[in-house]
Image: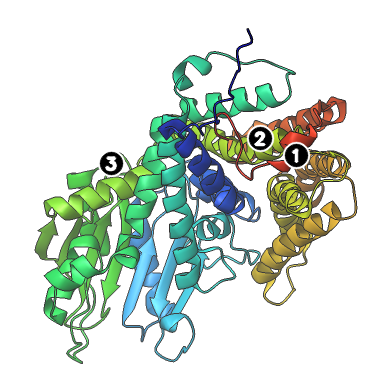
Amino acid sequence: MSVMHTRRPRIAKARGIRQTMSDLHIWVGLLVGWILYAMFLTGTVSYFRDEISQWMRPELPFQEKVPDAAEVAQRMAATLSTLAPDSPQWSIGPPHDRSNVVNAFWRDPKLKNRRGLESAVFDPVSGQRLTVRDTRGGDFFYAFHFNLHYMSPIWGRWIVSFCAMFMLVAIVSGVITHKKIFTDFFTFRWGKGQRSWLDAHAALSVLGLPFHFMITYSGLVTLMLLLMPWGGDAAFKTRGERQVMNAEMSAFVPPEKPSGTKVPLSSIETMVKQAQALWGTGNIGRVTINNPGDAQARVVVVRGDGGRVSTSPQYMLFDGTSGRLLDVKSRVGAAAETRGVLYALHLGRFADTVVRWLYFLVSLAGTAMVGTGLILWTVKRRAKLPDPENPYFGFQLVERLNIASIAGLSIAMAAFLWSNRLLPGSVLERAEWEIHIFFFTWALTLAHTTMRPPKKAWVDQLWLAAVLLALLPVLNAAVTQRPFWVSIAQGDWVFLAFDLTLWALAGLHATLAIRTMRHRPKTRPMKPAQRRRLPTVLEGEGT
């Protein structure tokens, strides 16, 4: 007697939450990963924004001791009374332990550009205007981080906000996807191809997970009025109410209407010393003088961000003619203080040198996290391609964008620093040309990826980045009076640390180039049945 066996119809297995989160993590990370990588890397170097600006202005003298802010403010008031006697506002940024010059700006109603602002740097000891090379310095990386520079600032910030929201989704979905994420943090299988990339991605993700969540969420908070203006519009309907809201979040004090009566300024030094007695000698952020030389003159001494985990405004307001203290703003409301704390956590301006280096290293790990995720996408898919040597167009596009976005960005940033040393000082709009060279070089790296096989393009660009970074200190020694041996002799840790960091980054890129040269990918061609049902979503764990 024979028994007939009937074949049961295969029931599709329901997709679980982890698989759904894996798909979400993969595609959210891929769609904005290239912009996120650039945002992370430029934001990372921006933690040393002031130091980069110093290095890019080698004409500025080495600062052995920070001058007293009160004396500097008095000296600068005398300088500006000659340089801009008719200006309705002077603003003086005294030097500090990370900046060796006075950054000052003043309003000139005759100027139609930049809202009538003129700015310059001054020697804090002599008060004389300094002639330095025209450069944006570290401010370029800082601004690119949140507005992408060449785009309209509003559109750039919208794109950055959109990518930051995707990053937040990627973080949450990544945690849900990796059920053994903390266990995998202690597991790294070197030289195992796809497995190694996944281990590296998981380790880098867990290493700074609280930081990555904080930096992404706080970054969105910095743009909250752009993203969700409806709450403020509903709560503050009139112009006067909006001015009150802005006053809660800013140290800007609108100038009084000038009286027209000429009255000399009282001692600025005495006013700043009163602020120093309250906040500390080295904690003066800015001194602004409204209506200088008029009976309605006002002096605003703003507290610096050092040593306090909040950027909420604190200032002292003085009568400019008598020196009488008119107001002390030392606290804001709970909502404004919450915003100030999140701003401070994101910007890291409160940090001392050790904490700033920690910020830098963990943020660099976040940059690597994004980069390894992008690379893992191609590594996992290449292993399953029907013909790994002839991938489909979408795969080739992602692979080329990965190379230009990761290795190419390093080359572009190095080219930006090279242009600072090589462009003649007489070039018109020199600062803009440094930025043009950055983007032109970055575009060339993308063009290069289309002319070389992917592996050779990776090796070429990683080696080029390593060489450019390694030779930058040599170039600096050849064309400036600030070579690394002089920095050692003077104890100039800004220039010395910059050179050492460049060599460390060059070593990192060289190591990656060597690892890429030696890598032999393991491919596993798919069976015809698998090829027919090739999904556009990866199986297994996320990127």
Identify residue type, mark 3. Answer: Val
Q: How crowded is mark 3: few (under 14 residues within 10 Å), some or many (20 or more)?
A: some
| Residue receiving disc 1 | 531
Q: How crowded is mark 2: few (under 14 residues within 10 Å), some or many (20 or more)?
A: many
Q: Label 1, label 3: how many angstroms apart (C-alpha)?
A: 55 Å
Quadrant of the frame with the C terminus? top right
Q: In this view, does 258 lie above or below 1?
A: below
Tell which circle, 2 or 1, labels the residue nearer the N-terminal end: 2
Secondary structure beneath dot 2 equals: helix
Q: Label 3, label 2: how many angstroms apart (C-alpha)?
A: 37 Å
Quadrant of the frame with the N terminus? top right
Most extreme residue toward the top, as rendered? Answer: 1
- Identify the residue at horizontal 44%, vertical 22% (top origin): 179
In this rendering, would 23 be left or right of 373? left
Q: Confirm or deny contact between disc 2 and disc 1 (CB under 8 A).
A: no
| Residue receiving disc 3 | 309
Q: How crowded is mark 1: few (under 14 residues within 10 Å), some or many (20 or more)?
A: few
